[in-house]
Image (tube, rainbow, N blue to C red):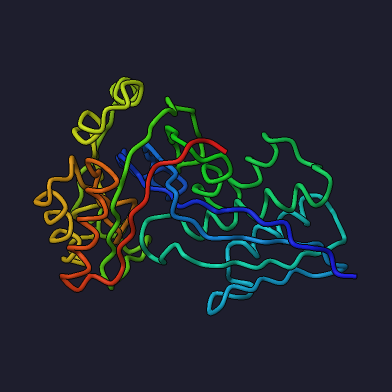
Amino acid sequence: MKQTFLTTFAYAKINFALAILGIREDGYHELQSVMQSIALHDVVGVRRTEEAVICNCGALSGQRNLAFIAAELFFKELGLSGGAEIEIEKHIPLQAGLAGGSSDAAATLRLLNQLYDTPLSGEELTTLAGKCGADVAFCLKGGTMWATGRGEYLDLLPNNLEMDLVLVKPAAGVNTREAYRQFDKYGEKGYISKEAWETALREASPQHIAGLLYNDLEIASMTMVPEISNLKQYLLDEACYGALMSGSGSCVFGIAQSRDHACKVSEQLKKKGCANVWVTKTVGHM
């Protein structure tokens, strides 16, 4: 008899702030970031199988899917002989800066650890997630976090934030590696203050948070997808407290005044012909 799937939500993330401090000796960029989980999510299901890993995700099925890679690493690290069947129902858009693939991988690791009787502690699971990709470690717990290094070193930030958001993505996506290449050509190093963010998040003031929004990759990604700039300005013109491109883009988010306000801005964007629009909100740690 086939085992039933264990399922979970795989929440998207946005970057409230992203500063690039420089290039490290290993070739990666040294970062500072404030990362936030949002309610937009994929649905991930996993069940045990006798052998092999199978990943079903529509056009994204197969061995290149990060969830497949995470599962393979899980079995290799633990020396387990079993396998898994992974089913992913996608809602988070690709090449948007929302960590959809990383969130799916993190959800897969959580479910595998549960299915195989919790062989890894939370710390060990986080270490394993970091080997899959920097955002995967964040997506394991989510909420609001301060990230440094490549994004794999994480500290909890005040997590009582409840904020309505509207997201809009241009038709074109942004390749993360290309965004960083463009930054290396034209960008300038930045810096963000952890203390300032801790204060703003403790206050849970949308206006205060809006004043701290920051992303060193915006200009680089805007050179590739100019519509990012237009959408950001539109969100500001529609009275969002603040707007910013998330991660390397191309998705832009606006901090709405309320759920009703987010819905109204969303409808206006759709009337303008924007096909990829979502009304969502922040979510806390898992």
- Residue 95 visible to the viewer: yes
User: Which residue is rendered at x = 49% and y = 28% of the image?
Assistant: 155
Name the one closer to the observer, 212 or 134: 212
Farthest-out residue, left: 237
Quarter of the view holding residue 250: bottom left
- Residue 32 visible to the viewer: no
Residue 195, percent from left and from top:
32, 20
Q: Is residue 56 above or below residue 84?
A: below
Left or right: where 231 falls relative to 258: left
Quarter of the view holding residue 167: bottom left
Residue 120, percent from left and from top:
76, 40
If the image is split into quadrants, where does the C terminus sit? top right
Q: Is residue 253 above or below residue 213?
A: below
Residue 62, percent from left and from top:
63, 75
Name the one closer to the observer, 145 or 248: 145
User: Which residue is rendered at x = 30% and y = 39% of the image?
Assistant: 17
Name the one closer to the observer, 101 or 286: 286
User: Which residue is rendered at x = 79% and y = 63% of the image?
Assistant: 4
